[in-house]
Amino acid sequence: MGQKVKKIAVMTSGGDSPGMNAAIRSVVRAAAYYRTECIGIYRGYQGMIEGDFTPMSARSVNNIIHKGGTILKSARSKEFMTKEGRAKAYENLKEEGIEGLVIIGGDGSFTGGVVFNSEYNFPVIGIPGTIDNDIYGTSHTLGYDTALNTAMEAIDKIRDTASSHNRLFFVEVMGRDAGFIALNTGVGAGAEEILIPEEDLGLERMLESLKKSRRSGKSSSIVVVAEGDKSGKNVYQLADYVEENMPEYEVRVSVLGHMQRGGSPTCFDRVLASRLGVRAVELLIDGKSNVMVGLKDNEVVSTDLEKAIKGQNSIDKELLRVSDIMTT
Ligand code: F6P
């Protein structure tokens, strides 16, 4: 492989996700394999602006593959959104002799990378890291699989108590703009109804479905609600609405929140992180830029970064249909 880049940097940016450490490890080890220097940047773009750098060797990423969070920390930098902030960041990278950057993050972080590249022609490669799975160009983002399992196990536990008390539970899962976590955990945990931002079927329909399941003999139920659902009511208002219309039900709410972003990554996320990290380094040292590495049909593929930001991962209609049938 003709090596065009001799010193690279890696950082994690935006909301953290399980598997980020495994991806850092992969980038650092792949760089060492190709005899390329690697620098870790703390706190994403903010650390780039402040020159918060650390040299990373193959041994500096020992014992992190199984850890949640990110050893490089993460941040959302307002300063990087300004020209002055990006100029400072560029000066720091130049001074350190860094010639390419691996960004592990979501679409906001990739947008920063695209702007930075257009201003300074600085090579950037993205690795999709977010539990929301809302990035075009990959079937799975890092951390999504772990978050699914975390949320599903939590809902299983809620089911135990819901069933003991004949209660109806509204469980809010993460997904500000996307319903991937809600739809998959809803099916996986056997939810009665699943509310997602991509499909607003209306409150009446939800009520009808809950009444129907009650009539059919179900004494407890789970409704999974994505954080960003478009019903016009938040999860507490939804619970009140159902309690008013179905006084026979005792309703409770559980918001799973940030626990979904933590924890040890699943095997799937660790393997994905390892594969994407290696490809990201290979692309960078081969002189490529402005692409995101991702997974399609279990193959590692590259997608133009701008496409990854603007494109939409659509929800699986088949899963919606299966969910409907399962509520019979
Ligand atoms: O990681 C993505 C996400 O989980 C969204 O679904 C959620 O709305 C957001 O992060 C919350 O992040 P924070 O609390 O860091 O602003």
Image (spheres, rainbow, N blue to C red):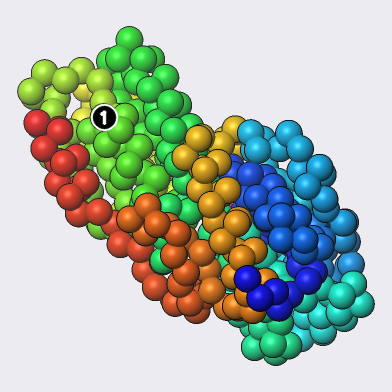
Q: Position of residue 96 (x, y in %)?
A: 90, 72
Q: Which residue is mark 1?
A: 190
Quadrant location, the N terminus: bottom right
* Residue 251: quarter of image: top left
Residue 80 appears in view: no
Image point (19%, 40%), residue name: 323
Indicate left or right for 39 with 235 as reference.
Answer: right
Q: Amino acid at mark 1?
A: Gly
Give the percent coordinates (x, y) of residue 33. 71, 55
Using residue 268 as the reference point, say whether residue 73 is left or right of it. Answer: right
Can you give x and y, in whole percent of width and height, for residue 322 in the image? 16, 41
Question: Relative to 158, is 172 above or below?
Answer: below
The secondary element bearing badge 1 is classed as: loop
Left or right: 116 as drawn, with respect to 179: right
Q: Quadrant of the C terminus?
A: top left
Q: Quadrant of residue 316?
A: bottom left
Q: Report the front residue among 295 and 141.
A: 295
Which of these two is toward me, 80 or 176? 80
- Look at the numbered disc 1 and say if its residue's Cβ is closer than 8 Å to ligand 1: no
Q: Residues within 10 Å of mark 1 (few under 14, many from 20)?
A: many
Q: Is residue 7 visible?
A: yes
Q: Residue sitting at 58 percent across and 48 percent down?
A: 274
Q: Find the residue positioned furthest to the front.
A: 1
Residue positioned 51% across, 64% down in the render = 293
x and y, in percent, of residue 106 in the image: 56, 62
Q: Residue at x 26, y 29 (%)?
A: 190
